[in-house]
Amino acid sequence: MGEGRSTVIDIARAAGVSKSTVSLVLQGSSAVKEDTRAKVQAAIRDLGYIYNRGAATLRQANSKSRIVGVIVNDLTNSFFAELAVGIDMVIQSAGYVQFLSSSAENPDRQLELIVSMREHGISGLIICPARGTQAADLKPLAASGIPVVVAVRNVPGAKVSTLMSDNQAGIRQATDYLIGLGHRRIAFLGGFADTAVFGERIAGYRTALEAHGVAFDLALVVSSPPSRAGGVEAIGRALSITERPTAAVCLNDAVAFGVCDGLRARKLEPGPDFAVIGFDDVIEARAAVPALTTVSVDPQGMGRRAANLLLKQINSNNPDGEAVITSVRLVVRDSCGARLTHRQQELTI
Amino acid sequence: MGEGRSTVIDIARAAGVSKSTVSLVLQGSSAVKEDTRAKVQAAIRDLGYIYNRGAATLRQANSKSRIVGVIVNDLTNSFFAELAVGIDMVIQSAGYVQFLSSSAENPDRQLELIVSMREHGISGLIICPARGTQAADLKPLAASGIPVVVAVRNVPGAKVSTLMSDNQAGIRQATDYLIGLGHRRIAFLGGFADTAVFGERIAGYRTALEAHGVAFDLALVVSSPPSRAGGVEAIGRALSITERPTAAVCLNDAVAFGVCDGLRARKLEPGPDFAVIGFDDVIEARAAVPALTTVSVDPQGMGRRAANLLLKQINSNNPDGEAVITSVRLVVRDSCGARLTHRQQELTI
DNA sequence: TGACAAAATTGGAACGTTCCAATTAATGTT
DNA sequence: AACATTAATTGGAACGTTCCAATTTTGTCA
């Protein structure tokens, strides 16, 4: 064993067969007799042989590396961590391994990552694109026949598979709920207007307002980074306008948590004093105080879905992707002042 | 561009040089004239050439794949997500890419992951071992000269580099602090006695008690899974003993959060009614209500450190590892009843 | 200008695997 | 027992790169 890992030829010598036969055994071919297979497998065990997947990939014309690239924009956001875990589950049980990296919301770094992954010959890519990603960034991948699944956020103009949550319906449900509680001055907080996700969610917000005859007021829409800090900033600005809002739908849970922080800093208790709704249902949402009412998208399930979408595309070599929209539902907890009994809460979860 | 990615030979033909020259350019050799380099680079750009790292790795005797394997036991725990981000930072700027996977605390799956990673020719591995990992599981890696860094938890008997936080000193500080606040019945909650981490932390607990002449009482040590649910369970049992504790040091932040949940379920407010200290300082600790007093280990910094340790070992081909213990400090927040002013809090953070 | 050193370039061979066509072994049929 | 079939096995060649030794080009100086 000592120096230099053993190769298929070493195994062949040890088992008294040819390297071709060893290769056949390795791929589980049925063309090899049972007792030679046993001999070979014994040799493999004895020599501590480990398969060189790089060499195999090199030889194989179709370049099946069994590597899937995964790029998320922020791994420290538990939404994306969960998503990655979901992807890993199905990827792994299909015999693939994942290259997982975080672009940290930086398109240049994201581009580097894509290049690096291509160099390693990934058989597919799942990406939650960084803000500012262009369709052109993904073009070369698609052009060289590497399936791509864009998840969570979309990239307008890119001809690849897309997996998005139903942003419009989700925010619409949330807004409906607030209106049902009697709120009329409802703010929309967080995010930037130049992103597709923002556009879809604000559309849901407007639709709900219009359906109930509540006037849309641009002053109630406050942009900010889609982060906890951004939420603090947004609620600060929202509370400074003349006719104050009494409730807010937030771009995502991170913003919602920031909004809660900002409210407390002004001696307002989220829930009783001001209704807050998030989006994503990250794992902390349930445990936060107050437990966050939010739109649940099941990140892990979404990850599994994205992975299945990708695998399907890898296996059927059909190049053009499909767009999937995953449904979404409002989970009512305690951050809107409407305190349900524990029993009722469990039912909605 | 169309079908089949272009190769070094295509570039050579297009630039009117030999493939060897192209290879030289690719590795940035100084032996190639400036204008030929320019010609080659132009051809590379024109043909949309992408480097085949697998082929290169195959050829290179030393097998520098520029892939680092990372295995954590639970990616959804933000401590490990942060750790992974820290690793990724330095790995990436050193031109490596990371294979990141979660073992989900399952040693069998962890073994599969290690095999898969070896097949892909990783140049090193950073692992937060799943519970029950044996030294033998890591042996073959070390034997074939692949550097391994074990982080966070250790594997007794494994001859590899180890990066641990100073568990004993951390818990000792925490316990000292509680004693200083006047507590005498202090519980130690969460974890299993058969793990090394548990052993070290409980040692810190005992040391502190002894130093202040407080008797150690085995009834105050309650084992449970090191999770939020485990914390709920542990505090339940701790409160049922005759001479109740008034404070608890917890194995980690997850347990501490569970303890807070359990206290609330019994109408006790964490902080004023019962002091709680965690370990890790996960990102939510600061934002929780009450903000959690905990032992801070800076997971991201620890990740960076682990990566540097690994890179050092990859570059200097010295096979035997070193053990590094990262220091740790108590961050006082609101979960022990000692309410500091906002100003004072900031100073300790 | 010729000789010589230094600089720049180049053609194979090799890395460990899979594929193909070809060979050899085993089985069945009359 | 001789043949036809089928089942098992096997030697190259190839994948895209790097390395080595060898060759060609360029530059320098007498």
Image (tube, coloured by chain):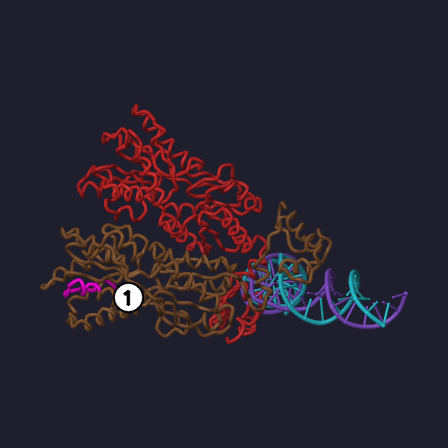
Chain colours: A red, B brown, C purple, D cyan
- Residue B228 in percent (x, y) is at 25, 55
> Within 10 Å of the Cα at label 1, are there few (<14), some (14-19), or many (20+) other Cα atoms?
many
Residue closer to the observer: C27 or A192: A192
Quadrant assignment, res B179: bottom left
Q: Which residue is disc 1 drawn over? A: B170
**Apparent side of residue B337 relative to residue B201 in the rendered image (left or right):** left
Q: Quadrant of the C terminus of chain B?
A: bottom left
* Residue lying farthest to the top in this orientation: A213
Identify the residue at image location x=14%, y=66%: B184
**Apparent side of residue B60 relative to residue A253 in the rendered image (left or right):** right
- Residue A151 in percent (x, y) is at 43, 43
- Residue B250 in percent (x, y) is at 23, 61
Q: Chain of mark 1?
A: B
B185 magenta-colored: yes
Segment tinted magenta in the rendering: B177-191
Say if residue A334 shows up in the picture.
no
- Residue A153 in percent (x, y) is at 43, 41
Eyeballing the image, is A178 above or below B336? above
**Apparent side of residue A205 relative to residue A21 in the rendered image (left or right):** left
State the SS at label 1: helix
Residue closer to the observer: C21 or D8: C21
B33 magenta-colored: no
